[in-house]
Amino acid sequence: METFNTGWFSNPFKTGFKSVAEVVGVYCLLLTRSTGVDCTDLPFCFVVEIRSIRHTPVLEIPQGKLRGVESPTDGHWMYLAIPYASIRRRFQDPRTAPRWTGTLNALDATIQCTQYIDLLDLPIGQEDCLYLNVHAPGRRNLNFNKTLPVMVFIHGGGFYWGSGTPLIYDPAPLVDKGLIVVTFNYRLGAFGFLCLGVREAPGNTGLKDIVSALRWVQRNIRYFGGDPGTVTVFGESAGAVAVSHLMLAPTARGLFHRAIMQSGTALSPFALNYDPLKRASYVAGNLGYRTKDPYELLQIFLNASALTVAFESEFPKGQPRNPFARFTFTPCLEQPLTKTKPFITKPPLDILKSRNFNKVPIIIGCNDKEGLLYAGQYDELELKKLDDNFGSVIPNNLFFNSSETKDSVVNEIRHFYFKDKPIDRSTIENLADYFSDTLFIYPTYAKSQILLQKTDIHVYNYLFKYDSSRNLVKKLLGLENYCGASHTDDLFYLFQPTVLWLLPTSKKDATMVHRMTTLWSEFARTGDPTPPQSAFPIKWEKSIASNLKYYVLDKNIEMGPTPYPDRMQFWERIYERCGPAAGSDHPTPAAGIHDAMFFPRPTLCGLLTRL
């Protein structure tokens, strides 16, 4: 297996992009290793020096012997690109990873599953991509006298983009708290979520990869000093949706003991593909075929090269943007087929109401201005188009039995958020609130309410509002004049990726990093996020059915009631009338792959905003 000495860099040289240089430079190296593109030919990249590395002692696990690398900055031990499963055939369930001979040099930080990179208009990655990374405290726990709690992170990226690379998701601040942290890749796009309703492509292979990673942790994490009986899964955005789906999946039962969902649940509009054959047919059309027959579609996707499938799964160029129709392939409800083990076959809402799911303590929350990521990218022309056709950007999990009903609901939604004002630059914050509520805040609220009404599990709600220099999305989009935390802004108070080498960390930022990592790690350790005898300014109280309590993470921490109650009640009324349960007889969701507005290919900031 070829490996690279990557990931632990000395300070890079700046070359003019300032805050984005640290992002793009690392990705430049990553793309060079993955695609062969010469980094020095790209004007937005800078040069990095690679430090000499120090190997960890050799470990032996059932698959074979391996050695990792010791971080030069904090002494943590990192075992990178360990195979946790294998892929026998496209669109099929993962298989057990084979043993290897000799000693595996677990050093490669660059492996990614096949995906499309917007910035370069280029598909990258490989189909042989089911690898994970184990991060451990290092020599201080060399004798492993006491096993440590384990946190398993599921990356976001809309189920079509991203990886578990430490170039972005270096969990050093969490490992500092005495944890073992695992990150990993899972299949993306069509390779992970082509759902044709046939045995050869039943769907949700990406989610089944995640289950395989959790099984690997159960079998092997003790060799790294981790406790397989204290495993917390956590994820952000699509990763949080995956965590939420894991709670509903019988095949994941017993593989984890706590869960954290950051900005996403199984009730989010992008959590399910309501018309998977239509999506597959759309991509087949890009490949030059016109069919909706599942077996014909299967052959089309099997015969095309992986990079071609990734490239042609991208959306029409030059079209206005719509976050509800952003992703071609996402989780689906599988058909009960013989000789298959489905991940999920019933709607998430039905499973939650049945009480038949994995009941574990949870932390669940989101950021206060999630929607700035989407609203902030509209230009004047796109805002005018949106003003003229607001009905094209309503949640795709609303269903209507007539055009009159749809028009009435669209007008009701528009008036609630904009009153009689036009949708333009002056109402960007209104638009951001609309996207925040529909994509993240209301689904989080709704899932919390159902869990508290139907079960006795502990639910800890939070709202992240902290706004400072590590809120990278706002910085890259030029939205620093708006208060609050955009989508993904919370990530960099838990992770210390290579891309932050040049960003200064203020005393206040360091305090927030300490607070978040302490809360998350204490929850992983005990199931209660507030440390005993805590010096924290306030205890994080769990919610109860009659009273959701939110831990507000801001410059001053406080416990508060449900945020934006009028907005939450508004969406409760809308979903009672038009949601998936009410719309079971309505097969067509509000926004589809053909009839919605789409995101155009982004600028440099797109690299970070898909993390």
Image (tube, grey):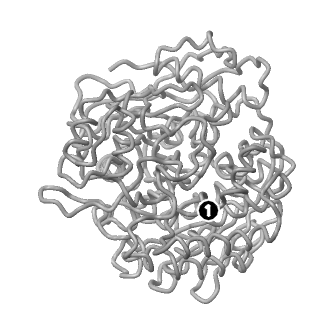
Return the residue found at the far left. 338
Residue with the mark numbered 1: 391
Q: Is residue 67 left or right of residue 534?
A: left
Residue 571 image offset from top left, x and y in percent: 62, 76
Looking at the rendered structure, the secondary structure element under dot 1 is helix
Please state which of residues 400 and 496 is positioned toward the viewer in this rendering: 400
Does residue 335 appear anywhere in the picture? yes
- Please state the horizontal and vertical placement of residue 76, each as a whole percent of the image: 55, 36
What quarter of the picture does the C terminus occupy? top right
Spot occupied by residue 166 in the image (x, y as percentages of width and height): 54, 35
Q: Tell me the quarter of the picture where residue 348 sits.
A: bottom left
Front residue of 94 and 224: 94
Against 74, residue 428 (above or below) is below
- Going 79% across and 48% down the picture, which residue do you hit? 509
309 to the left or right of 300: right
In this rendering, is residue 7 above or below 260?
A: above
Report crowding for label 1: few under 14, some 14 to 19, many 20 or more residues within 10 A (C-alpha): some
Q: At 29% from the left edge and 38% from the top edge, which residue is drawn?
A: 61
Query: Residue most toward the bottom?
Result: 546
**What residue do we see at 69% from left, 78% from top?**
562
Disc 1 residue type (three-letter): Gly
Q: Nearer the viewer, residue 62 or 237?
A: 237
| Left or right of 254 on screen, residue 12 | right
Instruction: Give the residue drawn at x 47%, y 84%.
Output: 456
Q: Is 253 placed left or right of 433 in the picture? A: left
**Number of marks in picture:** 1
Q: Is residue 222 visible?
A: no
Quadrant showing the N terminus: top left
Give the quarter of the image for residue 73: top right
Image spot of residue 225 (x, y percent): 42, 47
Where 456 falls versus 367 (above or below)?
A: below
